[in-house]
Amino acid sequence: METEIVKTAMDLTMLSKGLVMGVGAIGSGIAIGMIGSKAMEAIGRNPEVAGKIMAPMLLAIAFAEAIAIYSLVVAFIIK
């Protein structure tokens, strides 16, 4: 009986790790896609400002990618 409870707890731990990484990766992937899409749209409308758009775009992508890294850290912390 006790081993069955431990096995169920282990299965739920793996499920929670997968959910944390999945949601973190999906959210960050959508955010990066939207950032890139809107930046390219802005450059397409006004090519002269490409240099001014690229730096904030890369910064925003880095912040969005940090969310995926945070979810990876949380997945490693879950025991």
Image (cartoon, rainbow, N blue to C red):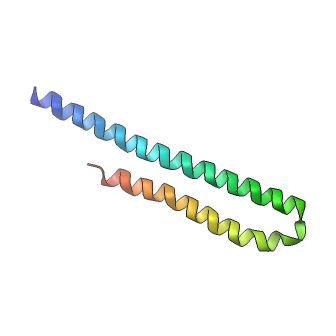
Name which residue lies at 69% across and 65% down. 57
From the top left corner, tell me how far across and down residue 53 is, in percent.
Answer: 76, 69
- Residue situated in front as seen by the camera: 2 or 60: 60
Name which residue lies at 17% across and 35% down. 6
From the top left corner, tell me how far across and down residue 34 is, in percent.
Answer: 69, 52
Q: Residue placed farthest to the top in the image?
A: 1
Q: Quadrant of residue 46?
A: bottom right
Q: Quadrant of residue 63?
A: bottom right
Q: On the picture, is 45 further left or further right than 20?
A: right
From the top left corner, tell me how far across and down residue 14 is, in percent.
Answer: 33, 39
Is 33 placed above or below 50 here? above
Quarter the N terminus occupies = top left
Is 41 placed above or below 15 here? below
Q: Quadrant of residue 36?
A: bottom right
Name which residue lies at 67% across and 51% down. 33
From the top left corner, tell me how far across and down residue 21 is, in percent.
Answer: 44, 47
Name which residue lies at 35% across and 41% down. 16
Q: On the picture, is 65 further left or further right than 72?
A: right
Q: On the picture, is 78 further left or further right than 60?
A: left
Tally of marks: 0
